[in-house]
Image (cartoon, helix red, strand yellow):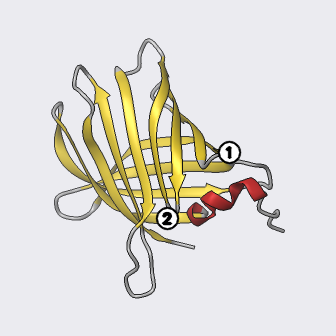
Amino acid sequence: MEPELHDDLKPLEFLLGTWKGAGVGDYPTIEAFNFGQEISFSHNGKPFLIYSSRSWLIEPDGTVGRPLATETGYWRPQPGNRVEVTLAHPTGIIEIYLGTIAFHQIEMVTDVIARTDSAKEVKAGKRLYGLMPEKNGVRDLGWVYEMAAMGQPLQAHLSAQLKKAD
């Protein structure tokens, strides 16, 4: 039995479910690439969303390649259409984002990034998640990630368009 959605989660309710699709990545320190991605947002009746994301390389011939990034965390809505997001990466990076919710769009920037000695240098991040304009009665989830890392200033790194899978 699915728990009842906590009232505080109403502004984030549009995210619930599993989303799958594809995106592109680029950064001055790497070659451009295409990737597949699956994102899941769920809840347990408490006032937070449980988040997980996994991605994989899409080879130039369209076949599925090696696994890429994965991250897990929690999205906690706050008064005044604000949101706090904590993300953990198995590469030794922990991020805390602060953001705003406006209709079916969330914009957030890093407040804190902590990393282990062996993790790559990441200095800042900015993310935008939102429902795309309706097409044939369906709204996809789009997202964009900007990053400042490896001595580079904040700039576009990843973007994807995902379809509701459940």
Q: Residue furthest top?
A: 117
Closer to the chain start, of discs 2 and 1, is 2
Residue appearing at x 39%, y 69% in the figure: 132
Percent across and percent down for residue 6 are 78, 57
Please identify the quarter of the rendering in which residue 123 is found. Answer: top left
Give the position of the N terminus as an image quadrant.
Answer: bottom right
In the rendered image, the vertical position of residue 121 relative to residue 35, given as above or below: above
Q: Position of residue 31 (x, y in %)?
A: 15, 41
- Numbered tag placed on residue 79 in the rendering: 1
Residue 163, above or below 143: below
Residue at the (60%, 56%) spot, across then down: 41
Could you say which quadrant of the image residue 160 lies in?
A: bottom left
The quarter in which the C terminus is drawn is bottom right
* Kind of residue at badge 1: Pro
The residue positioned 40% from the left and 50% from the top of the image is: 128
Where does the image place residue 85, in percent across and percent down from the top left? Answer: 57, 39
- At which x and y percent is residue 81? 60, 49
* Neighbour tally class for label 2: few under 14, some 14-19, many 20 plus, Cα within 10 Å: many
Mark 2 → mark 1, Cα distance in angstroms: 27 Å
Image check: 143 left or right of 35? Answer: right
Q: Secondary structure at mark 1?
A: loop
Farthest residue to the front: give it.
80
Front residue of 75/82: it is 82
Left or right, 126 with respect to 49, comes to: left
For the point 25% across and 42% down, the residue is 156
Q: Which residue is mark 2?
A: 19
